[in-house]
Amino acid sequence: MTRSTRQGEGRKGTRQARSDKSREQILLAALDLALEHGYQGTTMAAVSASSGLPIGSVYWHFKSKEQLFVALLEHCYQAWMELHSGPEGLRRKLSRGIAGLSGADPEHYTKEEALLKAAAVWALSRQLGGLGEDNEVRAAYLRMRVEMFKVDVERITESVPAEVVERFPDLPTRLTVLSLALTDGFFVHANSDVHLELDFAEYADMAATALEGLVADYARRAAEERK
């Protein structure tokens, strides 16, 4: 390899590193703005100002706001996958999902998790771009939601006694549906005007205790059938 070739590759690598850094700056700025102002209230101009990059740089990386938000959801999805990469009991899941969204989670509920939870509300209320079923961002979120549901089922399956899953194979799916309904519901409540006096950590504990009691009940039923 000649010296000029090495220099050329070095410059190319430096440009790529700068490009990657700019893209990350844009995504992090969009994440903060989206959490504060929602999808509709986040503009490309605001992302430019918040990231400290020229508007042309924002449009160079993302040709439209929809494209930017699809990339943002993918960024959040990857972060979510890393957080939920191992076995996850109901108590930890509900602590992150209920207590976390109010800032009461000792494991530090992430901005990425909060954005995915907010996107659920935006998607279901058709706020994502006002384009209904054809909206790129809404479609991307719903695809991710399906994959996240599958991951949740797998993780909860790992936390339920094997003999219980063997006897009641649909139990992990039912528990996943219940846990998502609880976390989604508490997210809506946390963003209403009547949540100020609630201790979300306490409610997360209550929800976990209830679902763990449900698992224990199924375990008793399975044990009785084996006698």
Image (spheres, grey):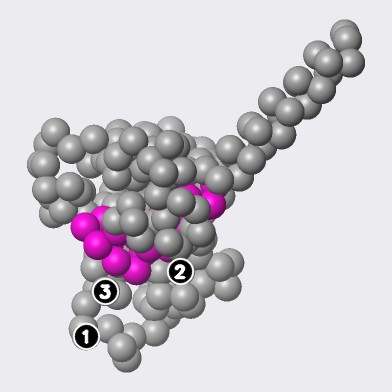
CA separation, marks 3 and 1? 9 Å
Viewed as shown, does residue 68 lie left or right of 159? Answer: left
Q: Is 26 in the magenta? A: yes
Mark 1 sits on what residue?
194
Residue 210 picture quarter = bottom left
Say whether residue 151 is left or right of residue 123.
right
Amino acid type, residue under disc 2 in the picture = Gly
Identify residue type, mark 1: Val
Say if 187 sits above or below 177 in the image: below
Picture coordinates of residue 126, whole percent (x, y): 13, 49
- The disc, 1 or 2, on the residue closer to the chain's N-terminal end is 2
Q: Vertical placement of 117 versus 171: above or below?
A: below
In the picture provided, is 134 more to the left or to the right than 53?
Answer: left
Q: Secondary structure at mark 1?
A: loop
**Secondary structure at numbered mark 2:** helix
Q: Nearer the viewer, mark 3 or mark 2?
A: 3
Q: Is residue 77 magenta?
A: no
- In the picture of the structure, the residue carrying the numbered disc 2 is 100
Q: Position of residue 154 (x, y in %)?
A: 46, 37
Circle 3 packing at 10 Å, graded few (<14), some (14-19), many (20+), is few
Q: Which residue is mark 3?
A: 191
Q: Position of residue 69 (x, y in %)?
A: 34, 45
Q: Determine whether the residue tagged by mark 3 lies in a helix, strand or loop.
A: loop
Looking at the rendered image, the quarter that the C terminus falls into is top left
Q: Residue 130 location in percent, x, y?
A: 11, 48
Left or right of residue 86, residue 212 in this image = left
Name the residue at 23% across, 41% down: 138
In this view of the protein, which residue sits in the foreground, 9 or 77?
A: 9
